[in-house]
Image (tube, rainbow, N blue to C red):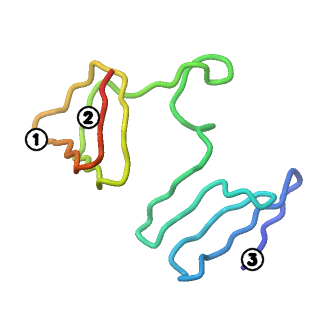
Amino acid sequence: MSTIKSSAEDLTLNADGAGNDIKFQSNGVEKASLTDAGVFTATSLANAPSLGTNSIIRTNALTISENITFAGTENGITAGPVTINNGYTVTVTSPSVWHVI
């Protein structure tokens, strides 16, 4: 385990017991992780697409231009309408649910 210090807080970089994930922690609270498959997950939505002071309105794109697959371990929500471009698919594996509202 190694520690990176900043003026604001201490960030701890450590691998899990299996050595597969890197977890970024601040004061013992996980802020983000990076898996051995290269998937980065931030536990904070501070950098999520948004508009307005204090990111009061969360946003998403109008079109999907990639193949997306729900693994069956998560649910999703999208503000619509949204268009899935030709040649791309969104696959929702049970028991996952995707809502377009």
Q: Report the amino acid beneath label 1.
A: Gly
Quadrant location of the C terminus in the rendered image: top left
Q: Residues within 10 Å of mark 1 (few under 14, many from 20)?
A: few
Quadrant location of the N terminus in the rendered image: bottom right
Q: Nearer the viewer, residue 21 or 6?
A: 21
In this view, 42 is above or below 82? below
Q: Where residue 96 sits in the image (x, y, percent)?
A: 30, 46
- Residue 75 is left or right of residue 26, and the answer is left
- Residue 88 is left or right of residue 62, and the answer is left
At 22% across and 50% down in the image, what residue appears?
93
Residue for badge 1: 87
At 29% across and 49% down in the image, what residue appears?
70
Q: Which mark is drawn over residue 2? A: 3
Residue for badge 2: 64
- Residue 55 is left or right of residue 96, and the answer is right
Residues at badges 1 and 3 in contact (C-beta under 8 Å)? no
**Mark 1 or mark 3, earlier in chain:** 3
In this view, 40 is above or below 37? above
**Mark 1 or mark 2, earlier in chain:** 2
At 75% across and 76% down in the image, what residue appears?
2
Q: Report the amino acid beneath label 2.
A: Ile
Secondary structure under the numbered disc 1 in the rendered image: loop
**Mark 2 or mark 3, earlier in chain:** 3
Secondary structure under the numbered disc 2 in the rendered image: strand
Q: Where residue 91 sits in the image (x, y, percent)?
A: 19, 46
Secondary structure under the numbered disc 3 in the rendered image: strand
State how far apart marks 1 and 2 are (Cα).
Answer: 10 Å
Q: Where residue 79 sits in the image (x, y, percent)?
A: 37, 23
State how far apart marks 2 and 3 are (Cα).
Answer: 39 Å
At 48% across and 68% down in the image, what residue appears?
35
